[in-house]
């Protein structure tokens, strides 16, 4: 079970980093969300992976550590609010700039051709 759990965390981190490195805003937002889910799973695993254990003392023989569960619950709420804020910023950026690239400018084939033509003209 631990191998599967750690593989899922690693897969989420890998996908999150891959999406963060993209040049468009929606994949960046999706990558940040996946990375936050990976961190939440990591925090949850820090309280030991046990099954059928109560989070409160006195209800069963064994118990699960409630602190990581409380931290993850808080992180989920904060992460959801931050995701909503970043989505609103991305929508505003798209409305103001006309595209959804992270740096605000899109490299197209026509602009590449213009740049290469300018270089050829400056050499001549």
Image (cartoon, rainbow, N blue to C red):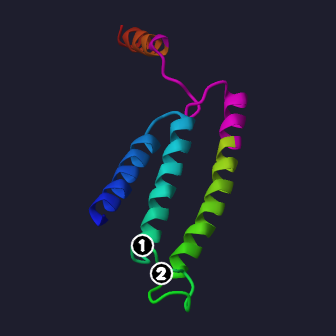
- Which dot marks residue 71? none
**Residue 1 colored in magenta in the image:** no
Q: Earlier in the sequence, mark 1 or mark 2?
A: 1
Q: Which residue is mark 2?
A: 64
* Residue 75 rendering spot, x and y as whole percentages: 59, 65
Q: Which residue is mark 1?
A: 51
User: Is 31 above or below relative to 74?
Assistant: above
The secondary structure type at the circle numbered 2 is: loop
Q: Nearer the viewer, residue 122 or 52?
A: 52
* Residue 72 rendering spot, x and y as whole percentages: 55, 68
- Left or right: 23 as drawn, with respect to 70: left
- Disc 1/disc 2 C-alpha distance (Å): 9 Å
Q: Which residues are magenta?
A: 88-110
User: Is 8 above or below relative to 2?
Assistant: above
Q: Residues within 10 Å of mark 2 (few under 14, many from 20)?
A: some
**Camera-side mark, 1 or 2:** 1
Quadrant of the rendered structure where residue 87 is?
A: top right
**Residue 107 colored in magenta in the image:** yes
Quadrant of the rendered structure where residue 18 is?
A: top left
* Residue at 49% over, 56% down: 37
The secondary structure type at the circle numbered 1 is: loop
């Amino acid at each position: 079970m631990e191998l599967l759990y750690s593989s899922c965390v690693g897969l989420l981190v890998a996908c999150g980093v891959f999406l963060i490195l993209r040049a468009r805003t929606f994949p960046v937002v999706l990558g940040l969300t996946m990375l936050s889910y990976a961190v939440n799973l990591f925090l949850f695993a820090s309280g030991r992976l046990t099954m059928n254990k109560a989070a409160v003392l006195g209800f069963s023989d064994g118990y699960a550590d409630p602190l990581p569960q409380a931290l993850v619950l808080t992180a989920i709420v904060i992460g959801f609010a931050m995701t909503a804020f970043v989505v609103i910023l991305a929508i505003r950026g798209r409305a103001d700039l006309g595209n959804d690239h992270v740096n605000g400018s899109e490299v197209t084939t026509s602009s590449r051709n213009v740049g290469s033509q300018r270089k050829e003209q400056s050499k001549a």
